Amino acid sequence: MSIFDIFEQIKSDKGSSPSGPPQYIIVGLGNPGEKYANTRHNAGFMTVDALAERYKFSIKKLKFKSLTAAADINGVSCLIMKPSTFMNNSGEAVVEAMNFYKIPIERVIVCYDDISLEPSKLRIRRKGSDGGHNGIKSIIYLTGKDNFPRIKLGVGAKPSKDYDLAAWVLSSFTPEETELMHEGTEKAVSCIELMVKGKTDEAMNKYNS
């Protein structure tokens, strides 16, 4: 193996060797299975997948009712999670991981879809209500707290007020929207890099729509 090959291998392992127990949990909300892969409700999964792509690791270890990965994100040891519980029971996975690693709710960053924002738009909050989102509702119910930071990714509003909400969030993005979502998830990853360094205010100022 040449020096160049070794260097490329080191680069490919970026983020795959955490420096210790996780200091943060980063959760992307969504529904498991290929059927839901490109749907609006899976914006959280798309975000942590973009994070994995930037840092060159795979989210594939089954733990805490989730697909998980341990990675250093911007120099901070993190547990990355994609709950396999389906959206409405996301809190089960989050609570298991929190309890195991004794991580406080303030260090759980949750990424999820928001129909009040257009694709590529973000809204970062330190805390808040569930806003009618069932995944967030589950986390708040099972932890008893709502003071966890979250990144909301715009997925577009319903075509009309009479359009069924469940049908809308489980619908697929158009090719044009997919491009915008790529832009949005890249910005969300940059937010995560700031937030794990305690720079949530900076992330809010820079990326909030």
Image (tube, grey):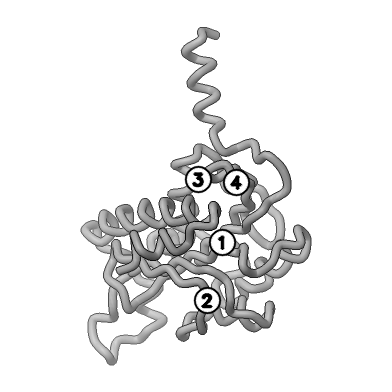
Is tag 1's residue or tag 3's residue first in the polypeptide sequence? 1
Structural distance between the alpha carbons of marks 2 and 4: 22 Å
| Residue type beneath disc 2 | Lys
Q: Please name the residue shown 45% across and 42% down the image.
A: 53
Q: Please name the residue shown 36% across and 64% down the image.
A: 205
Give left or right: position of 97 versus 169.
right
Is tag 1's residue or tag 2's residue first in the polypeptide sequence? 1
Numbered-mark total: 4
Name the secondary structure under disc 4.
strand
Tag 2 and tag 4, C-beta contact below 8 Å: no
Give left or right: position of 21 versus 108.
right
Is tag 3's residue or tag 4's residue first in the polypeptide sequence? 3
Observer-side mark, 3 or 4, equals 4
Residue 158 occupies which quadrant of the picture? bottom left
Q: Please name the residue shown 24% across and 86% down the image.
A: 160
Q: Estimate how packed mark 4 is, as few (under 14), some (14 to 19) or many (20 or more) residues with alpha carbons within 10 Å.
A: some
Q: Which residue is mark 3?
A: 52
Structural distance between the alpha carbons of marks 1 and 2: 15 Å
Structural distance between the alpha carbons of marks 3 and 4: 14 Å
Observer-side mark, 1 or 2, equals 2
Residue 16 occupies which quadrant of the picture? top right
Residue located farthest toward the bottom when viewing the structure as drawn:
162
Residue located farthest toward the left when viewing the structure as drawn:
176
Is tag 4's residue or tag 1's residue first in the polypeptide sequence? 1
Give left or right: position of 172 versus 75.
left
| Residue type beneath disc 4 | Val
Residue 177 occupies which quadrant of the picture? bottom left
Q: Which residue is mark 4?
A: 76
Q: Which residue is mark 2?
A: 127
Where 184 sits versus 31, above or below? above
Q: Which residue is mark 1?
A: 27
Is tag 2's residue or tag 4's residue first in the polypeptide sequence? 4
